[in-house]
Amino acid sequence: MAEWLGVKFGFLFGDYSYGANLGMKLDDVPIIMGINWVILSLATRGIIQRFFKLPVMKILVSSVLMVSLDVLLEPLAPRLDYWSFDTMVAPLSNYMGWLVYSILMQSLLELVQFKGSF
């Protein structure tokens, strides 16, 4: 849903569109993106929960780790025809949106007491 809102309205991440290299799309959003969010959320959670016990720390540090991955991916994405922003570079709103959405995802995992092991 977050990706659809982003592509259609620029909400959360800024004005961007997906290229052809992420496979089949549903209303201009690659289906794999939903799966990517789940995998990234679970993976960062699995890594971080080994180091932190306090729920707020697990949520915040996992979220920062997720945003850090996005920082690394953003310069490569247009070259790989994954996605690109109308402004040619990812705006600050993209990273803020990632942080907000990551905190939401990590809070949900905390709420359901996800205890994955990686």
Image (cartoon, rainbow, N blue to C red):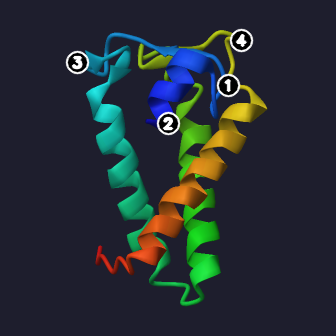
Residue 118 left/right relative to 53: left
In the depicted structure, whether residue 70 falls above or below residue 113: above
* Residue placed most toward the observer, 104 or 53: 104
Is disc 1 surrounded by few (<14), some (14 to 19) or many (20+) residues within 10 Å?
some
Badge 1 is on which residue? 90
Badge 2 is on which residue? 2
Q: CA distance from mark 1 to mark 3?
A: 23 Å
Query: Residue 1 falls in which quadrant of the image?
Result: top left
Q: CA distance from mark 1 to mark 2?
A: 16 Å
Q: Earlier in the sequence, mark 4 or mark 2?
A: 2
Q: CA distance from mark 3 to mark 2?
A: 17 Å
Q: Secondary structure at mark 1?
A: loop
Residue 87 has which mark? 4
Amino acid type assigned to the residue bearing label 3 in the image: Met
Q: Secondary structure at mark 3?
A: loop
Residue 108 left/right relative to 85: left
Q: CA distance from mark 4 to mark 2?
A: 20 Å
